[in-house]
Amino acid sequence: MASKKKKTDTKSISKNDAAKSQQRKQLDENVAKAKIDAAKELHFVPTALLFTILVCSGALAVMSYRDMFGTGKVIFGGNDEAMLHFTGSTKWYDDSRGWKSTAGGFSSVQQVTTDENDMGGYFVKKMAGAAALAFHLQKLIPVLFQSSEFDWGYDHFKPMLLTSVLGNFAVAGFYVLHFDEFKTSNAENMGFVIAAILIVEAVVILAFILAASFGKSRPSLKSKTLPAGKGPKSIVSKILARTFCIVSGAIAVIAGRGLFFPGEELPFPPYDDIYLEWTGAFIHSPPAHSIEEREHGLEAPLHAGDKFISRLMALYILIICFQKLASGFLVRVGKDNSGEKKCKTFWRAQCIGNILLLFTMRVFAPAALSASLDLRWHIMSLGYETFILGLYGY
């Protein structure tokens, strides 16, 4: 009897040990799963935010791509066609020759500028599309192709998204200010849709940033060794900051003139009057008390669409330059040395955006040269900035 009782006690103890072992194993698995889920929550951009940017910026990027590579092609119905007629983009679209048609692509760019082909006006339309595409890709690329080194929970995307929100509001406000002009071509519906998309996206981004800032506490990163000669408040890259100041700073001045004082000649750069004449700025925005005003003053209101797209191009370029300068001067190294990661969310997309602008300028260089406008210095300066961006971004 005693031996049977001992065997029973041994079996019960072994069963209890197995149950406890199973409980410990299950507990360890739950803890590991919780840690993985927490790590994913800290790393990945929230799905709702990702979906919003994909839909809003994706739709606007498609339109910008059309403006750059298929100027004048209608892709969103009658309202889109009305906007294209307002901006005069349909002038270069012709698909009557089947597969031989240029259809608003870069193959329709002529080597020589004439009054008939208006390569300067075509340049403005293409550059507006390239600049808009660069701006929307700045939002799309970092969140769609999220690198393993960028974490949502540690605010690596915050500077890029905040500057994008400001850009969205600026472009939306610009469209709202031109609603009365859109009505002349029945383009107010398309203008309203574009402004609404920009505002909705900006509001959603702001909501997620605020939720992340005032939400539940996150584990703090341990202090990392900072780069030699730099402190938490140091600029991430002085080389890029100087490059942005020189190249993008000069571009921002010219773009600012195009937005706020279209048609006004600057004392620099050289041949600025030729640029204004080539792009048609003297026609849609003749300077007050000038020869151009006497010649084109009466017909200027008829070119409201050309003036709108010219100023829109300048606005997008200003926003791009602002984001570059913000990444160069406003983002700091930080105590956790996360400044470089925050800047790379800018630099990688900006490098691609610069390539789009470079490509457009290079294709139009012969046409500009035929009008005595040499774009070589512009291309070389932007090319140098693009090279530095690629070097530090990738």
Image (tube, rainbow, N blue to C red):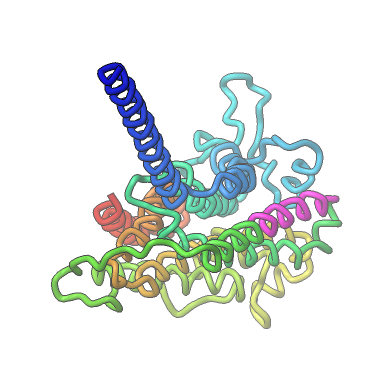
Q: Could you say which quadrant of the image residue 380 lies in? A: bottom left
Identify the residue at image location x=49%, y=77%.
266
Q: Is residue 191 magenta?
A: yes
Q: Is residue 114 left or right of residue 303?
A: left
Q: Quadrant of the N terminus?
A: top left
Residue numbers of the magenta segment? 186-201
**Residue 239 visible in the displayed image:** yes
Identify whether 272 is placed above or below 15.
Answer: below
Quarter occupied by residue 165: bottom right
| Residue 183 drawn at (x, y percent) | 85, 57
Q: Position of residue 314 (x, y in %)?
A: 56, 64
**Magenta stretch containing residue 174, yes or no?**
no
Q: Residue at x 63, y 21 (%)?
A: 97
Q: Is residue 363 visible?
A: no
State left or right for residue 332 relative to residue 368: left
Residue closer to the observer: 343 or 270: 343
Residue at (71%, 36%) from the top-left corner?
Answer: 74
Task: Check the image and name the residue furthest to the front.
Answer: 1
Q: Nearer the viewer, residue 161 or 364?
A: 161
Q: Give the percent coordinates (x, y) of residue 137.
A: 49, 48
The one of 33 and 73 positioned closer to us in this rendering: 33
Residue closer to the observer: 217 or 137 = 217
Q: Residue at x 30, y 54 (%)?
A: 393
Q: Quadrant of residue 286?
A: bottom right
Q: How many marks?
A: 0
